[in-house]
Every structure is written in C-alpha cells, then in structure tokens.
Image (spheres, grey):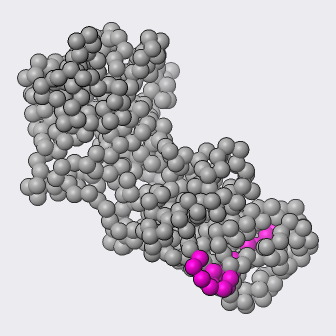
Amino acid sequence: MTELLTAAQMRAIEEAAIKSGDVTGLELMECAGQGVVDAVFEEWPELLRTAEQEGSPSHSPEFGGQNDAPLKAVVLCGPGNNGGDGFVVARLLKRCGWEVVLWQLAPLSASAEDALECEKQWIELGGATTEWEQLKELAAPDLVVDAIFGTGLARPVPQTVADIFRRVRDQWQKQALKDGRTCRCVAVDIASGLSSDTGAILLPDIDPKEGLAQEWPGFMDWVFHADLTVTFHNAKLGHFIGSGDGPTGKIVIKRLTGIPPYDSPWGLPVSKAGHVRLLEPKLFGRDRPLVKHVPQLQKLSGHKFDHGHALVLSGPPGQGGAARLAARGALRVGAGLVTVGCPMRAVTEHAIHLNAIMVRGLDGTHGLSELLEDSRINAVCLGPGLGLGPATADLVRNTLSSKRGTVLDADALSRFQRKPEILFESLHDNCVLTPHGGEFARLFPDIADKLEHEPGFSKVEATREAAKRAGCVVLFKGADTVIASSEGYCSVNASYYDQSAPWLATAGAGDVLAGVITGLLARGMNAVEAAQAGAWLHSESARSFGPGLIAEDLPEQLPKVFRSLGL
C-alpha cells in the first residue's frame, strides 16, 4: 500500500497490461470479482458454510447446509466496468448457494464489452435484475455490495442511488441489528459517491428547497458507507485524503492477475513526480527504506556536534511556550544540541523551564546574525510564538539569507500574508513550510480557493502547486498531511484507519512537529526527508501515547517510538 494511484494512473496500468497481451479485460474483471468474494470470506469467515457446493470460488465458501437457510446478498451494479465486477460477484455468490438480488442503475453501455459478457453469464446462471420498487420491499440482506461507479466518478450520484444508500443505513442495517444479525457493506474499488482522486464526497449543487422530493438526502447520503473496501493493484489517492477514511471502512488490496506488483524504490526520481507515496511503518526502522538511505535517524557514534545544532527562535515574554515545545521536539528527535534564541527580556522565563536546552539572549537581526556566525548551528525554526510584528519578517529574511536548513511555521508564515511573494523570493530548497489550512489560505489564497471550489482539484495538487511557487518543501498539515517538493515529489502521511491519531487536535502539537523537523534537518536530512520522517514520527508518537495526549507528551514518546523501530 505504498503507492497511491489516481483513476487515470490505474486506467493506464490496466490498458498497458491488456495491450501487452498478458491479460484480457475480461480476465481482469473476473479476477476483480473473485478478489471481492475472497476478501468478504476472509474478513467474515462466519459467512462460510460447510455443505459441499459444486463450482464454488477458489476460497471454497460453500453454502447450503442441511438446516441452513441461504444467506442473502444485494449487489448494486452501475453501467460501466465497476458494474461488470458486480455481475461477477453476484454470479460467484449465487454459485455458492446465496440468494442474490441484483439491482442495476442503468443498462451497460455498448462499449463495455467485458461487462456485457459478465452480465450474460449472470443471466445464463438464472440471475435477473430487480427494479427499485422491488428493492425497497426487501428485508435486510446479509451483504450489500456496491459496484455502481468505482474510481471514474466525477459527479454526484443520482438521487435514486442516494436513496438506496439511505435505505441501507437507516433501514436494512438497523433492521438486521434489531434481529440480532449484521448487514455488512462492501465497496468495489472505492465507495460510490467518493472521488478517487480528491477524497471528496461529491455533493450536488442543488437547493433542497426548490421542487425536490420531500425526503431530501442529507450530506452523508450521497456516498456509500462500506465496512470493507476491496480495491485492486494499489490503494487510490481518495482513500487517504479528504473524507476518504469515513466511507471506506477497512481497505483490502487484491492483486490483479497479469499486472505485476508496483513496488518502486523509496527515492522516486523527478521523472516520476506524478506519483504519490504513502508514509507507513514499513518505511521506517532499521534496514527499512527511509532509514537505510537516511542513517541520521540512528546514532551509532560521534560527538554531539556530529548530530547538529538546532536553533529555535522565540518571541517576547509570556509567549515562549510554543518555542520551548519546538525545542524539546528537536532535542528528543536527536539533534546534538538545541538552543532557544529569544529577546534578552525573555531569557529568565526560558531559563526557568529549560535544562538540557540552552538559552541565548539576542535582540533583533543583529543579534541573530552574530549567533549565526557559529557555523555549527545548521538548522533554524522560526514561527512558534514568535509574534506578528515587523521583527518577525526581519528575522525570517536574515535566517533565509544564511541558507541553513529552515522550518517556517505559524507566525513566520502569517507575517507574510499581505505580500507572500516577498517570502517566496527568499526561500531555498532546504526550507520546509508547515502551514495548517488557515495559514495555507493566507499564503496561497488562489490555490486555497481552487481547493475549496474546483471539483477534482485535490489537496495533493494544491500542495504541489504551493511548493512549486514557494520553491521549497511544503507540508500541508491535517489528518491527511501532504508533503510536496518544488520538483513535484509528493507523499501523504494519513492519520486514517488503524493509523488514526485524533489526539493531535490539541494546542501546541504543530509546534512540536516544527521542532522535530528542525531536529532532523540539523541531523543531516534534506528538507523532503526531514518533513516526511517528522510527520510520521509526530503522528506515531501521538498513537503511542493515546487518549489524554497534550503537546508536552509528544517529544517524550519519541524514544519509545524509536525503540519500536529497532533503532
């Protein structure tokens, strides 16, 4: 699940495989349908029955025990290839002894030859399609399969489909629960109503007060909510950004026969800038790709100065907590030395709180210039608690002119909101900007506007455009943190599914992240590596601590995370 694909990339992969002659479109469709059925019985083995049934799928889910009533499935099919996958699923379940009801949104298009063949085989097995009115009268089934649209959807689902989604959730699932059963929901490739490229729920632009049906679907009725999503070859971008985790449930990836696994090396060259990597545990730890190429995560030998000296600049008295959090993050991630630079009048405040972290009083850019004469200071963090006064802009420009590794966060970003181009002119490729949504909109208002209003424009594209304009690495924070370089390289750190870290929604968490990235820059990582490793370690620290987390806890979890990685 390392490489995240767009709909266009997945189509290109399938078309290339078919063109090569290694596999036919029909074989891919059969493999996809079989993968869905296999995944269902792997996830819910209680759905297996023991009586012998001829012609069962490869996973042998036979049905029809002597005293067992057949289980019931509803398969929802669309007019394209996703619907073809649904016909395969319906046929395989029916051959296993299930009672299968198949509803079809619209007839298959004439160009969907493979799907038409799968429909033919379904009919030859005695299968039929049911009408919407009949579907409404059905009792709760044991399984609902969404094979309506798949990855190519770029517009809202029809209201009839939204009505079906509501029926599944509000009637069938509740009825099954009342009867002591479970109505399980499975999506084929991606939940219908969810954009596979942006993770957005595709909502209609209609005023519900103007002549629509009395029962107007609500926001969440426009997308199918799956307990399990079975996707093929690789996960899709929309599974891990936007609202993707809500409707998706658990993700299972099934390989398609005839398409080789896509396992590219960690360091994607610029020529593959269109690809997006998912940051995940298998990339971190001893002898794993990121650490193997970036040994700075380990301390095997050396003097403290061999591991870098990070400088965190702080604002006036009473606003130093954020800088101290950042400094603690830099120290815990392994920077050899960390100094908080602050106005002279704030030295006492910091000295009371800090021990292993040094404090240096300085006033204005002149004091900073003197401090930066020490070439051993090789990474600087500006922004947390720095303030929005004119001095902040001067400190930022002074630091950037030194060409050191630099992290700009919070106030160091917002200070340039009126004329962000002044900031962009000074940035270099060893800088990392770490905006949250509001800060991003202040620095890149036109890109933020596109992200909010243009269908099909994703957070990945927004971050790439921002990084190209800024000329440095941009880390766009959120549960779906996106990291992009000015060359177009992109990765996603998604706190979704079993990697969820909701406790990061706490004051000061972003300050710690800025400090962790600064510490990694000090240790010798380049800007992309530091941003990626910092984002992952930050969210992993939150998961390590769990509920009740406050920002002060994050740095203290890093040693535990490192030990779990074998470092």
Q: Is residue 21 above or below residue 231?
A: below
Q: Residue at x 37, y 15 (%)?
A: 140
Q: Position of residue 50 (x, y in %)?
A: 24, 23
> Front-most of 179 and 451?
179
Q: Residue at x 38, y 57 (%)?
A: 2
Residue 539 within the magenta-colored segment of the rendering? no
- Which of 304/537 is in front? 304
Does any portion of residue 467 appear in the rendered image?
no
Residue beneath the point at 21% across and 31% down: 60
Which part of the image, by quadrant, shows the C terminus?
Answer: bottom right
Instruction: State left or right for residue 407 relative to residue 247.
Output: right
Task: Answer with the quarter of the image where residue 187 lies.
Answer: top left
Q: Measured from the top left, where is residue 134 in percent x and y? A: 28, 11
562 or 276, which lies in front?
562
Q: Residue at x 40, y 71 (%)?
A: 267
Instruction: Quadrant for residue 19, please give it.
Output: bottom left
Which percent across, then down, holds residue 86? Answer: 23, 31
Magenta range:
299-315
- Residue 256: in sight, yes or no? yes
When the figure is inspected, residue 235 is found, relative to residue 150, above or below; the finding is below
Q: Is residue 198 left or right of residue 209?
A: left
Q: Nearer the viewer, residue 51 or 444?
A: 51
The location of residue 98, given as percent across then percent down, is 23, 20
Number of callouts in the render? 0
